[in-house]
Amino acid sequence: MSHPMTITEKILAAHAGLEYVTPGQLINASVDIALGNDITAPIAIKEFRRAGAARVFDRERVVLVADHFAPNKDIPSAIQCQTLRQFAQEQQLRHFYDGGDMGVEHALLPEKGIVVPGDLIIGADSHTCTYGGLGAFATGVGSTDLAAAMITGECWFKVPESVLYIFRGQLPEWVGGKDLILFLIGQIGVDGALYQAMEFTGEVISRLPMADRLAMCNMAIEAGAKNGIIAPDAVTQAYVANRALRPFTFYASDPGADYAGVREFDVSNLEPQVAFPHLPENAHPISQVGNIPIDQAVIGSCTNGRLEDMRLAAKVLKGRKVASGVRLIIIPATPWIYAQCLKEGLLEIFLEAGAVISPPTCGPCLGGHMGILAPGETAIATTNRNFVGRMGHPESKVYLANPAVAAASAILGRIAGPREL
């Protein structure tokens, strides 16, 4: 008797050594990649030592990236990065990224082929779910779970139920993956997919480039999901072909697989979306935003700091100037993206427009550095969260949007779409 399974269930079953799994089942599964950053890994390293462990389970599969408060902004952050550095050296980790090698973790790992389709990936960072864009099961865990995985190579999971989100139609200009996920979170709410697997499909998704797929899965956590996932296809194949450091597997959901729900959307008339403070679910189409002056615009992060995002911003900024009184901060997510921006002349466009270009870092997204807001200030950002105080002072406000909207807003001095230019 066969058990039709969703792509999420298949990956979990394969890694648990089981023929099939069902939602709600508790499993122990082997982990392909265990990831930590300079905020979460120091806690995991402490637990690792407390457990009396001597070696990580596999020095190729424990990945540490110093990206949150790096380049170090103060003494505590310097100590956190030092903790990573010393541990990586002692354990001879193959994948430790620091200094000029360092990029925003969730842009860096796919780019370097460290995460591949069919993987089971855990990270002590909630946006680990980004890698679902490659057709992997990826989810965030706490630092103690990361410590356990660093020692054993395993982690326990409750199998999530899956919900299918089908996107039909043809995306209008200036509308991309970021708008799809903001729109969807606006429809279902920040706990609308609580502990569920969000599976994205439909002709709109199959036409999306990898950058947009990663951006969509990146924000699955913003709907409360366990993971976001897109079945791998020709786009995935082209992306991983010359990158993958390990063999990979393309999984797909079976016909007849059981879903807790199916939602269909025709997005042919979708406008660029703007999420108002202080929740990603407060999504509004750009035409209904009204007059909202801004002090700062940020283009970057693990959601929208990829090369495609940089090109989109440059397209809007070319030959134009940032409005007086607005700070535009552009953060290419990895050294490779930075280098490509240089080669393609994008950095010149950014500088001529009056932008500040930052080295790769998570920076202001989590109120780290490189652009913290003062009381009463308003920012538009391509980041993923706009909770109270997320980018600085509790009395500041953050609006979320795609890179074209963030760039257009920087030029006009208020939240606006590129069509207004």
Image (cartoon, helix red, strand yellow):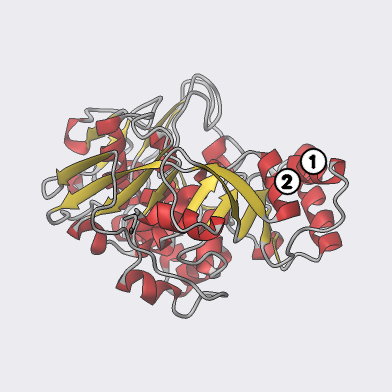
The circle on residue 47 is: 1
Task: Using the image, determine if residue 355 lies above or below residue 398.
Answer: below
Q: Which residue is drawn at 83% across and 58% down?
A: 55
Considering only vertical position in the picture, is 22 above or below 338?
above
- Measuring from the top left, give residue 234's x and y in whole percent: 31, 73
Q: Give the quadrant of residue 47.
A: top right
Query: Which residue position holds label 2?
Result: 147
Vertical placement of residue 207 versus 262, above or below? below
Say left or right for 87 vs 37: right
Q: Which residue is drawn at 59% across and 59% down?
A: 103
Helix, strand or loop at mark 2:
helix
Is residue 98 rendered to the left or right of residue 341? right
Q: Give SS at disc 1.
A: helix
Please say if the residues under marks 2 and 1 sit with CB atoms less than 8 Å apart: yes
Query: Residue flagged by tag 2: what amino acid is it?
Result: Ala
Query: From where the camera sits, is residue 309 visible?
Result: no
Q: Which mark is residue 351?
A: none
- Of residues 121 and 373, the one nearer the viewer is 121
Amino acid type of the residue tagged 1 in the rendering: Glu
State which quadrant residue 320 falls in. bottom left
Dot 1: within a 10 Å radius of its alpha carbon, few (fewer than 14), some, or many (20 or more) residues? some
Where is residue 54? Give x, y as percent: 87, 55
Distance between the Cα atoms at labels 2 and 1? 6 Å
Pick whichever, 226 or 306, lies toward us: 226
- Residue 289 percent location from the top left of the image: 23, 30
Residue 81 horizontal/vertical position (percent): 76, 49
Give the residue furthest to the front: 1
In the rendered structure, which disc, 2 or 1, sits on the residue that comes first in sequence?
A: 1
Q: Nearer the viewer, residue 264 or 239?
A: 264
Q: Is residue 4 visible?
A: yes
- The residue at the far bottom in this view is 242
